[in-house]
Image (spheres, coloured by chain):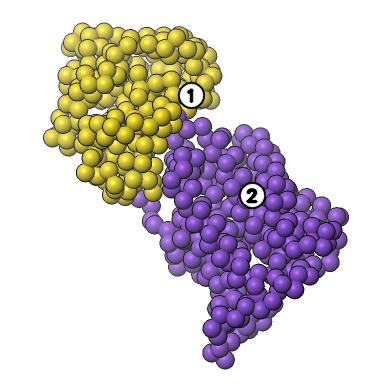
Chain colours: A purple, B yellow
Amino acid sequence: MTELIFQAIYSGLLQGGSYALIALGLALVFGTMKVINLAHGELVLLAAYIAYAVESAFNVSPIVAIPVALVVVCISALLVYLLVDRIKKDRELNSLILTYGIGVMITNAILLIWKADIRSTKSAWLQDAVVLGPFYSMRSELGFFILSLVLMGLLWWWLSKSWYGRAVRAVASNRDAAKLMGINPRTTEIVSFVVAGILAAFAGVALYSYGVIQPPLGHALTVKAFIITVLAGVGSIPGVLAGALLLGVVEALTVTLLSSALQEIAGMGLFLLVLFVMPNGLFGTAARRG
Amino acid sequence: MLQLENVTVRFGGVTAVDNLTLSIGASEVTGLVGPNGAGKTTLFNAISGLVRPGAGRIVFNAVDVLNAPVYRRARLGLGRTFQVPQPLSRLTVRENLLVAQRFGTGSVNASRLDEILDFVGLTEKAGRDASSELALSELKALEVGKALATNPKLLLLDEVLAGLETTGKRRFMQMLKDMHAKFGVGILIIEHDIETISNLCKRVVVLNFGELIADGAPDEVFRDAEVIKSYTGAEHA
């Protein structure tokens, strides 16, 4: 039993890597634009289906689809931005309705093109077992987890050291103050949508490479990203990573010890627990002194 | 340097700035005073671009900036501070200034940045988190430092001395005087304390209900019957 629990924790941690990429994209867009992009999970799902389409059409590894997924998802993210940007009044609220609608449209487009069947990769190489001491995982799980950590490291570097990254942080911190420093907030908004698209593309290909995909998954991914963002508190990359790993572990333990039917409810339970007990999130800080 | 022509700002049925015409010369230090609700901060918002006037014209350094976004006005040399300091959280003090310099001027000049940090007295706090590790007087100094880093030609200071204790206020006032001399920047300052304004400015502009009611040297303006009435609600005895 103990072995089973440790194995579940290990699998949950690996799953958390992809969750972190999805949540960081959502948090980045929310930071700069104060918009919760409810179509973000569908963008991830789009990348997953592109991986499926490329694999099916050319009989190649889904990993080959990463450049295609990057282009398609980034363009889609920019289109979402252009539509959201057209909302001039009560953008925070109206964008919820708009992005929810975009998410529904993407899901239906996926249904039309790729049907409702459950899909998973045919690549035996990606599904081969990798043994790490007492722990087992698929090669793709471990590989994409490492890639997630690398991408998060790059994102941290970009936000901390590059000028556009600093501008994104400045706008997220205080929009008016940033504008008075000469920062064009539109540029940072576009940049954050593109970066969110890049992260979504990698996460989507990852999900297809070690899991199963189906059209309704996008909505569930958005909810997971939202839960992680709340768990993390006011966004920091380590906070989001920890929140994502925690969600992954809770889900995996629920599936192992209780039932796979309770997986989504477990995440929601964690979300409510943190919301009631630690409203600033696990890593958030209380409002700053006046 | 700054010309406002018939500028009007309305919020619904309330006219916050009413047909205001005003000119501020290069390197002047001008006080902007008036009772609460006179439209001072709204005027600052209109000049810096945070509020769009319903009518009028705003020309800065020979450029019509009425329709220019805030960031473009900042790059043209219009600096502004807020009454409640607005540091960029999760960025250090130095990063706050660095970002302001890079985006405000288009380049980075490390020695100039050090000079500004030293001038506002934040050299020792340069590595600290700007949002959680500074006292109020330091946050106010950072606010001025950020604005200076954009290399402004005109700096709009919104009650920058408010909330400071007497010694801090004196020190800050000296800093503003030195800033004008050292950086050659024009200053338009909102301040309630008449003594401060008289000490700092050679010219004072008074607003009441969004209208310009006096403009001149502090000694003359603060003896003006209409100005006294606007503050006290009564004729001067």
Residue B190 lies, with reference to residue A226, above or below; the image says: above
Q: Residue at x 66, y 79 (%)?
A: A129
**A69 lies left or right of B112:** right
Q: Position of residue A41 (x, y in %)?
A: 67, 57
Q: Position of residue B64 (x, y in %)?
A: 49, 13
Q: Residue at x 22, y 9 (%)?
A: B217
Label 2 crowding class (10 Å Cα cut-off): few <14, some 14-19, many 20+? many
Q: Quadrant of residue B5?
A: top left
- Which mark lies nearer to you, 2 or 1? 2
Outermost residue, left side: B167
Outermost residue, bottom side: A1
**Residue at label 1?**
B72
Q: Amino acid at mark 2?
A: Gly
Residue A10 lies, with reference to residue A204, above or below; the image says: below
Q: Quadrant of the C terminus of chain B?
A: top left
| Residue A220 visible in this rendered orientation of the protein | no
SS at circle 1:
helix
Q: In the image shown, does A128 or B4 lie closer to the viewer?
A: A128
Q: Amino acid at mark 1?
A: Arg
Residue A88 lies, with reference to residue A240, above or below; the image says: above
SS at circle 2:
helix
Q: Position of residue A38 (x, y in %)?
A: 65, 52
Q: In the image shown, does B163 or A281 lie closer to the viewer?
A: A281
Q: Residue at x 59, y 47 (%)?
A: A195
Q: Which mark is residue B139?
A: none
Q: Position of residue A290 (x, y in %)?
A: 32, 46
> Which chain is disc 2 placed on?
A
**How many angstroms separate mark 2 from mark 1 (CA)?**
28 Å
Q: In the image shown, does B125 or B193 lie closer to the viewer?
A: B125
Q: Which mark is residue A197?
A: 2
